[in-house]
Amino acid sequence: EAGVTQFPSHSVIEKGQTVTLRCDPISGHDNLYWYRRVMGKEIKFLLHFVKESKQDESGMPNNRFLAERTGGTYSTLKVQPAELEDSGVYFCASSQGVVKYNEQFFGPGTRLTVL
Amino acid sequence: AQSVTQLGSHVSVSEGALVLLRCNYSSSVPPYLFWYVQYPNQGLQLLLKYTSAATLVKGINGFEAEFKKSETSFHLTKPSAHMSDAAEYFCAVTTSGGYNKLIFGAGTRLAVHP
């Protein structure tokens, strides 16, 4: 069974440019999460989809970030325009069902560098 | 609000020595607690989780953790370290109420030397 995949693995962009990150969850997982780790800090929650609906977007830093999950399958996270402080590793995770302690399966992350 | 504190951003042990990684949590409601491990260039992998059943939880690769409510702790241990245990370890909490998001500690990087 394929795990959570993320694309690209690395992205280097200039300040002010746009970047789109993609996450493909494990097939059949209704829950999809985005997290971010800024260098040296803890991994922080960004948002949670249940199928195509945003269940919790309390961690989104500002309106430069836009997440979508069309059709309840893969998800994209767009940063527009990117700022220096957006640099970090963006993780996607997916899980099955509604039980809160169900394992979240993580992808390898996308390392974003904004110059 | 929940929070997690991991004492020690870097821990170094000798191969064969005891591994002890510390995690303290703060939660106003009964927590669910997790330990994840990240090997280089890989995603986070679940080691074990506490879901209010047994307070001593056994996980993969010989790791275990004990939930101590009085100390608000969930420390991770392994009796004998292997070179392959070198990785970054994350403690996380979520709760039975509210949403499913995980609240992570800052991580502890474990080095194992011969």
Image (cartoon, coloured by chain):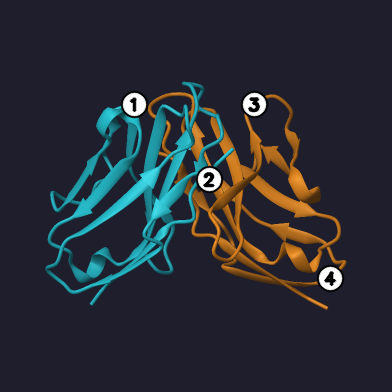
The chain identifier of the residue carrying mark 3 reads B
- For disc 2, the marked residue is B92
Do dots 3 and 4 share one subunit? yes
- Name the kind of residue labelled 4 in the image: Glu
Residue bearing mark 4: B15
Q: Secondary structure at mark 3?
A: loop
Is B46 positioned to the left or the right of A85 in the image?
right
> In the figure, what tint was chain B given?
orange
The answer to whether the residues at label 2 and label 4 have Cβ atoms under 8 Å apart is no
**Colour assignment, chain A:** cyan
Distance between the Cα atoms at labels 1 and 4? 45 Å
Residue B103: give x, y in percent of width and height.
Answer: 45, 44
- Label 4, secondary structure: give it: loop
Identify residue type, mark 3. Ser
Residue ranking furthest to the top: A98
Q: Disc 3 to disc 4, how far (Cα)?
A: 32 Å
Numbered disc 1: secondary structure: loop
Spatial separation of the CA atoms under disc 2 and disc 4: 26 Å
Q: Are marks 3 and 1 on the same chain?
A: no
For the N terminus of chain B, which image quadrant? top left
Q: CA distance from mark 1 to mark 2?
A: 24 Å
Q: Which residue is mark 1?
A: A51
Residue A39 lies in quadrant: bottom left
Q: Residue at x 64, y 26 (%)?
A: B52
Q: Are marks 2 and 3 on the same chain?
A: yes
A11 horizontally vs A108: left or right = left
Q: Is residue B40 above or below residue A93?
A: below
Q: Amino acid at mark 2?
A: Ala
Q: CA distance from mark 3 to mark 1?
A: 28 Å
| In this rendering, the label closer to the viewer, 1 or 2 | 1
- Of the numbered discs 2 and 4, the one sitting upstream in the chain is 4
Task: Depth check: give the residue in front, B99 or A93.
Answer: A93
